[in-house]
Structures are given as C-alpha cells and as structure tokens.
Image (cartoon, rainbow, N blue to C red):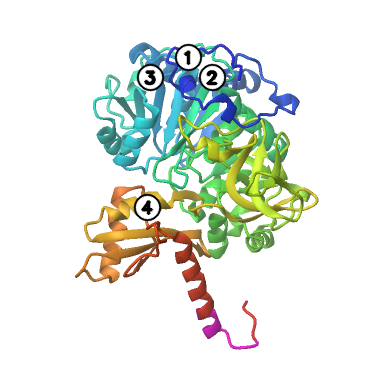
Amino acid sequence: MSMMPSAHVDTFTRDHLPPADTWPALEFTLPELHYPERLNAAAVLIDDAVEQFGADRPALWTPDGSVWTYGQLQQRSNQVAQVLTEDLGVVPGNRVLLRGPNNPWIVAAWLGVLKAGAVVVTTMPMLRSTEVATLIGLTKPVVAISDHRFVDELLVAAGDEVTVLTYGAGNGFDDDGDLASRCGHKSGKFTAVDTAADDVALLGPTSGTTGVPKVTMHFHRDILANADTFARYILQPTADDVFAGSPPLAFTFGLGGLVVFPLRFGASSLLTEKAGPVELAEHASRAGATILFTAPTAYRAILKENRGDLLRGLRMAVSAGEHLSKETWEAVQAATGLRLVNGIGATEMLHVFISAAGDDIRPGTTGRAVPGFRATILDNDGNELGPGNIGRLAVIGPTGCRYLDDARQANYVVRGWNVTGDTFSMDADGYFTYQARSDNMIVSSGYNIGAPEVETAIDQHPDVVENAVIGIPDEERGSIVCAFVVLREGVTGDATKRKEIQDFVKQTIAPYKYPRDVRFVNELPRNPSGKLQHFKLRDGLMKANASQTEQLTPAGQSQA
C-alpha cells in the first residue's frame, strides 16, 4: 500500500504497521474526507481554530468555573511541544505516554505531543504499574507525562527507561520535574511539524478479550475523519455548543466527544475529573452544556434519582459504550423530552460509525451507518447476509483497524471489512439492532473489561487454585464481572473471603475491573483437552435464573 513520505525520524510506528494485505478497505466518500497529503491534526484543531474562531473564545471549562481560551490552549500546547523537543530531545515519531484524568493540562499535552510530530499514547490513570509496564513494553515511549496524583505507579512501571514529567503539583517555577514549570520558561511559539496525513499520530490501547492489550494505530487524518463524519452529520455542532461527558480521554469515545469534536467546530468542552452520574449532570447543567456523552448506565442512574430536570437544557444526549435498551430510551424521553442518540463505535475505528439522530431515530435500534461509513452483517465465513439475518457486524469507512505488530489483525479484518466482535441484525431500511457481544468482552457501565485479564489477577491470590470470569446481565450496569473461583483445600468460601478477593483485584488491576459477583465452586467445566468452557458457566446461570423465575412466577402469570 503506497504511503506518503513520513516526517518521522523515529520510524517505529510505520515499521510496525500490519502488512498491507491485512489492512481493511478504506473509503473516502465525502468531500470533507479529502485531506491534504501533509497534515498535522493538532495544527488543524487548535491553530486553525484560533485563526477561524478567535483566541478569546472559550475552549475548556472545569467545574469550578475556570476556563482556558483557545489562545491559552494554543500557547500551552506550543509550550509542551517546546519542552518535548528543546529540553527532552523528542524527535518526530517518538512515543509520548500520557496519564491523567480529564483536565485542561492533559488536553494541552495531547496537542503538544502531536504538534511535535510525536505519537501520543494516552492511558487510563487507574491502571496499575503492571498494566502500565505492559503498555510501555508495547509502545516504547521515550517520555511520560503524568498528573502528579497518579505518578507513583507510573514511576514503578517506567523504571530508568522513560523520562517522567508531572503536572499539577505547583512545586515552583524552577521545578525541572514539573511540566507546567518548564512550560513557564517557553515562549509559546511553535510551528507544528509537517507530518504526513498518514503518519501515525495516536496509539490507542484496547484490552480486547485477552490479557494482552491490542494497540490500535491511527493517522493524523483519522483524528479529523470522525469529526467530519459522526460529529458533522449526526451531532451537527456549532461554535455555541458546550460538550460534556463521562468517558476518560484515554478512551477514543471521550477523546472525540470532549476534545476533537468541540475543537473542530469552535465549540467548548466541560472537563470533569471524576463525577458520578448525578454529579456529572449537575456540572453539565451549571455549565450550560448542550451535548452530553455518557453510558446508558448513567442516564438510568440520573432518572433513578429523579434528576431528569438536569438534562433538559441539553440539545443532544449521546449514549454509547454499551447497549441502550428501548426501555431506557423511552424512560429518558418521558422524563426529559430528549431523544437519546444511540451509537456504536470501536477503538479500532476511533469513534462511532453507526448512529441516528432526531427523526431518524428508531428506538431499540442502534441506527444506520454514519455518512462516510457503510456497514453490513456477515456470516461466520465472511459472506454478507441480507436483511433480517443475525450475524457479525462489519464496517468500512475512512478509518479502520491497524494493530501495532499483532497477529490478531487477521481476526478483525475479513475480506476488507472491520469485524467488530458484535452480533447484530439489520432490517430492510439499513437499521442495525444489537444482539450480543460475539466474544468474552464484558461491557460494564461503558467500560470494556477483558475477562482473561481479570482471571489473571484473581489467580495471583494465594488462596485461589483457578477461576473463570464471565459477564452477567445487570439492570444498572448493563453487565457486571462475575468470577467463579476454586479455592485451595481448607479455605472457606464465605463473604469475608469474597471481599478479600475483590479488594485484592482492585489492588492488582484497575479497580473498575474487579468482580462484583464472586461465586465459589468445587471445579470449573473443561472439555476433554482441558480447555475451560466459559459457555457452560453462562448456560448454567441462565438455567439457574430460569428455574428461579419459574419458582417465583405463579403459573399463568406473565413477568413484568
């Protein structure tokens, strides 16, 4: 596959792109998707925006009411780029890892890395040192920038191989270890590196369904493409919009909704570091937010607390990250008047590619292929199925799956299609309806949790002989992590041991991945070759639940 001359001095990412014959098909069917050959996404998102919308326009809000203007964000991102290139010797193509909650400095750092021609690797601040070390081993960053409150685990993972800078501690103007201090010495004048449109800009880790993360690779043009498809055609933002939401910027869902989309259209964004659903809605209401991104779980929690009034000022509310049921959609509309915008995306595709808004919404469906994308249903052999059939969701568009040096590329791309791992059906009008995940990914409150990773963490507990993890349905969270645990002989499986294992997992991997349901069993189901049979655990639970329902529901009565 022919690529443009790269600006990267460090050629690691281009050298580790998957073989060209394993790439998905790429299509650029809209005029907005015809980008110039030389393109730096950060220069477009902040430099062009300052020129078009003005330096004094608000860009980033925080819940305390403070604001960074477009001009301030431009200056600070330029200063970050200066620190990286002038002080730390970062060259185009080097990787820079970011770690922190949603706040203005992480946005400035993200833009600064791209301006410097480097490749950004944004990670969840909740990840433990072992998880961060795995990502460092895969992406090989030369510098890591971290919020000072989350640096300890990073320092353990980084060792002596990676230069670590913190921000936010306020340790003084001459603190060489503090990014903000270093930025204070810089002019704020920086010309973005003239990267190619198909130079890698972003490495996005995704846990997938195995304990070894997959790392998705995205070009500078990809970052703009999602704004010029989903945002432009479904959200239709204006410069007066205020975006808000719960997803971390380490998730490409959050990166798009809270950084790329607002900057692309001259709007502003409210960044909340950590907030429960109702608190998020309160912050959004006070800030005058007009577009909200969060998971169905959050919308249900807001309604459960009878605070639907907090959402009534929104122009648009987006639901993604997990299945949105028709019941939740109807409850939100009844309480707020809002027609939730459903959607499905993937880290491999960068953002949402199936959705619908306004009068095009059909409750209970996810929507249609977003302009710029096309989607279909495949059977197990990779053949397209007609309307009315259930099969594997597949999509083609201006973005697509490229894993960093990973054999699993062949599993995701089938005959040019990106196959997401979701089971859907499609009707005659092209509307897609979600059925289930096709693998053992657990989607809980919008978080993707790989069952094998949780199993590995539980196995490290000294009293655990073996375990198996599955997702089970949950009314509030969509699904929760359920662990079946075999304890060593003589150890009692009781409530105390259950909490001990849960706390152990929270200390081993990111806390949101811990098993909320722990069940002690004598043995796990295996086939004759010894392979663990997760499906038997799921089937067993379904049968047990059905049996319980039969006992609780008198004959002749229907369930509510």
3D distance between C-alphas at marks 2 and 3? 26 Å
Q: What amino acid is labelled 2 in the image?
A: Asp
Estimate how packed mark 2 is, as few (under 14), some (14 to 19) or many (20 or more) residues with alpha carbons within 10 Å.
many
**Rendering coords of residue 355 (x, y %):** 68, 45
Pick whichever of labels 2 and 4 is earlier in the sequence. 2
Locate the N terminus by quadrant: top right
Residue beneath label 1, please? 8
Q: Which residue is nearer to you in this view: 51 or 259?
A: 259
Residue shown at 33% from the left, 51% from the top: 456
Q: Are marks 2 and 3 in contact (CB under 8 Å)?
A: no
Q: Secondary structure at mark 1?
A: loop
| Residue farthest left in this picture | 490
Locate the C terminus by quadrant: bottom right
Estimate how packed mark 4 is, as few (under 14), some (14 to 19) or many (20 or more) residues with alpha carbons within 10 Å.
many
3D distance between C-alphas at marks 1 and 2? 8 Å
Pick whichever of labels 1 and 4 is earlier in the sequence. 1
3D distance between C-alphas at marks 2 and 4? 34 Å
Residue beneath label 3, please? 183
Q: Are marks 1 and 2 in contact (CB under 8 Å)?
A: yes
Residue beneath label 4, please? 454
**Rendering coords of residue 395 (x, y %):** 66, 40
Residue beneath label 2, please? 199
Residue 553: within the magenta? yes
Pick whichever of labels 1 and 2 is earlier in the sequence. 1
Pick whichever of labels 2 and 3 is earlier in the sequence. 3
| Left or right for 62, reference 524 | right
Q: State the extent of the magenta-drawn residues as a range.
A: 548-556
Residue shown at 48% from the left, 75% from the top: 544
3D distance between C-alphas at marks 3 and 1? 24 Å
Q: What amino acid is labelled 4 in the image?
A: Val
